Amino acid sequence: MAKKYDAIIIGTGQSGPSLAARLAGSGMDVAVIERKKFGGTCVNTGCIPTKTLVASARAAHIARRSADYGVRIDGSVSVDMKKVKARKDATVRRSNEGVEKWLKNMEHCTVYEGHARFEESHTVSVGDELLEAEKIFINVGARATRPPMDGLDAVDYFTNSEMMEVDFLPEHLIVLGGSYIGLEFGQMYRRFGSRVTIVQRGNRLLSREDEDVSKTVREVLEGEGIDVLTSTADYRIGKRQGQIVFNMTSAGEPQEIVGSHLLVAVGRVPNTDDLGLEKAGIEINERGFITVDDRLHTSIEGVWALGDCNGKGAFTHTSYNDYEIVAANLLDDDPRRVSDRITAYAVYTDPPLGRVGMTEAEVRESGRKALVTTRSMTRVGRAVEKGETQGFMKILVDVETKKILGASFLGVEADEAIHSILDIMYAGAPYTVIQRSVHIHPTVSELIPTMLGELKPLE
């Protein structure tokens, strides 16, 4: 006999707990199911732990540069990896335990710990128990891809999740993957003191970004002593005297890398393969993502999919916005939609990349008339004062509407400064509004109005 609830939420990633609170607060009896760690990817193996590690790595980097600022450190700078990990673990624990306590102490909410599987469209099993609800919300997230590759299964390797348990300094870390995760870990461990080689299949890093962004990021990483190989293929992995041997071609030439450890960061797949979705009739696409409409309904009435598993965004902020969209439609009579969302994210290399809207390449492909403005961080007072002048800012504007189409900020505090652009885009206002605003000096954002006064045709 199934236990009946008004709503069932599968997974406690970014959107799940907040949705549980809204539904329970509206008087619904809610069941929340979590099979492993409360808080999902962001809390346990994503944003919170990695950015905590990035902060430790940056501290080591700045300490090594102390003489540039007139600060003398007697003796060499060393990193205690066990303490680095302990700091990260403490930060994660506060968030993880906070989510768990919040849910377990929430009125009208019952927490089940175990793996959920659909038995029918509105019936879910957890161990020996059956749960039933008219409304079911799938929030199961994603995990690292483990690609088929010659020899990979014969060696020990890390994914981003398993890197969270590292409390030692790899002698030579080989990073397979030149996108966000790979670059963040690569720079981080180089700053901790490892030798690092990044192997990218495509012809440039961050292949979804504009070429000027990719080129500058590569220059930053190579400037810190990271080896970067692009246009690689024909991977063969093996062992030799306790080391990992990675053979490949790079730009058509044979290459062999011998390293102590390997991080595989070549993408993520949704956790939808063991949910019994076929029993419920819930459709997925060819990559395993649950098919949803603009308000996150699945193919089954009364079932929604939120977060990374729906393929509509792979970020904590998009997952949280999924919760807001569902809650607004269900509880507030507010017809919010996924298509209202503007693409926005950051890559936490140092300096960081902040991105909103369209890239320059996408604007060109669209065929629309556009204006562009760029400014090197060497011409940003705040960056000069901080001694961090790598990177640039770029903004694209539609000629006819005068609305901002997109921006790429790569530089110190870029992940914060980019929000000036994002907010004006959400407001639907012309660029002249921010061009005429008076920003605070000295900041990175103060140069945005100046830049917008220097727009030129995109040729």
Image (spheres, grey):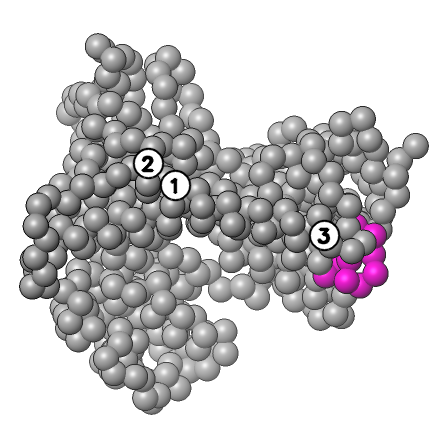
Work out whether residue 230 can be spotted. no
Dot 2 corresponds to which residue?
Answer: 82
Q: Which residue is rendered at x = 78% and y = 56% of the image?
A: 107
Question: In this rendering, is residue 148 above or below 361?
Answer: above
Q: Disc 3 versus disc 2: distance between alpha carbons?
A: 33 Å
Circle nearer the N terminus (3, 2): 2
Q: Nearer the viewer, residue 430 or 160?
A: 160
Q: Disc 3 versus disc 1: distance between alpha carbons?
A: 28 Å
**Numbered tag placed on residue 125 in the rendering:** none
Q: Amino acid at mark 3?
A: Asn
Dot 1 corresponds to which residue?
Answer: 86
Question: Is residue 109 toward the left or the right of residue 459 in the image?
Answer: right
Tell me if residue 313 is in the magenta stretch. Answer: no
Q: Which residue is rendered at x = 40% and y = 44% of the image?
A: 88
Q: Nearer the viewer, residue 120 or 189?
A: 189
Dot 3 corresponds to which residue?
Answer: 105
Q: Amino acid at mark 1?
A: Ala
Q: Are marks 3 and 1 in contact (CB under 8 Å)?
A: no
